[in-house]
Image (spheres, helix red, strand yellow):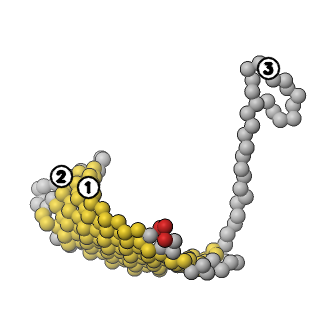
Amino acid sequence: LSLGTNDQLVPGQTIVTAFENVFPVEEVLSFNRRASINWEYNGPHWFHRAYVYDTKRQRLGTLSEQNDTEFFFNGELRLNHTSHVEISWRYKDIEILPEERRSYERLYRLGYVKELNTRASWGVFIQHINRNAFDDELNYDDNRLYFSYTHYFGVKNPKKRSHYKNRD
């Protein structure tokens, strides 16, 4: 039935009212600045990746501003042609102004990865996460032990580095 018509309901018909919330689109003009430094090394037994990001978001017309800084390091030590040890560290700092809210997050991870073949690997990791936030309900200290299994469907493991030319 259409609204505004004089149609009569017949037995078995019902009217269902649907409410729709329509929110207007608000255009926001903002200024974003991002600086980064990346460094990667890939040797026969050691691989590492490190980066630093610094991001500033500022809503023009208001005093709202957010500053993010992140440091990350990941290293892999190849033990043999099918296994390696991984170590990771990440630090993230978020500051929101003018409310002066700030949160810090630290992640530490150590793991062992064994490649089963050219398309699959498994790993065991121990991880510690520490977060200090502006809101006490968001603070946490967490330790985890977890296992992982990775399967590359249709492709070979892109990280696999054989020390033997005839082996894949």
Q: Earlier in the sequence, mark 1 or mark 2?
A: 2
The residue at which mark 3 appears reads as 10
Which residue of the protein is positioned furthest toward the front in this rendering? Answer: 136
Answer left or right for 51 relative to 159.
right
**Residue 129 higher or lower than 82, as above or below:** below
- Observer able to see residue 90: yes
Residue 69, quarter of picture: bottom left
Answer left or right for 22 relative to 125.
right
> How far, Cα to Cα, is label 1 from label 3?
62 Å
- Observer able to see residue 162: no
> How far, Cα to Cα, is label 1 from label 2?
14 Å
Q: Secondary structure at mark 1?
A: strand
Q: Earlier in the sequence, mark 2 or mark 3?
A: 3
> How far from the left and from the top, in percent, is residue 7?
85, 26
> How far from the left and from the top, in percent, is residue 24?
73, 58
Residue sitting at x 76%, y 30%: 15
The residue under label 3 is which amino acid type? Val
Q: Residues within 10 Å of mark 3 (few under 14, many from 20)?
A: few
> How far, Cα to Cα, is label 2 from label 3?
68 Å
The residue at which mark 2 appears reads as 116
The residue under label 2 is which amino acid type? Leu
Q: Are marks 1 and 3 in contact (CB under 8 Å)?
A: no
Please state which of the two labelled residues, at mark 1 or mark 2, is closer to the viewer. Answer: 1
The residue under label 1 is which amino acid type? Phe
Q: Nearer the viewer, residue 107 or 2?
A: 107
Q: Nearer the viewer, residue 74 or 47?
A: 74
In the picture, the quarter occupied by the C terminus is: bottom left
**Residue 25 higher or lower than 140, as above or below:** above
Q: Which mark is residue 147?
A: 1
Q: Earlier in the sequence, mark 1 or mark 3?
A: 3
Residue sitting at x 83%, y 35%: 3
Q: Secondary structure at mark 2?
A: strand
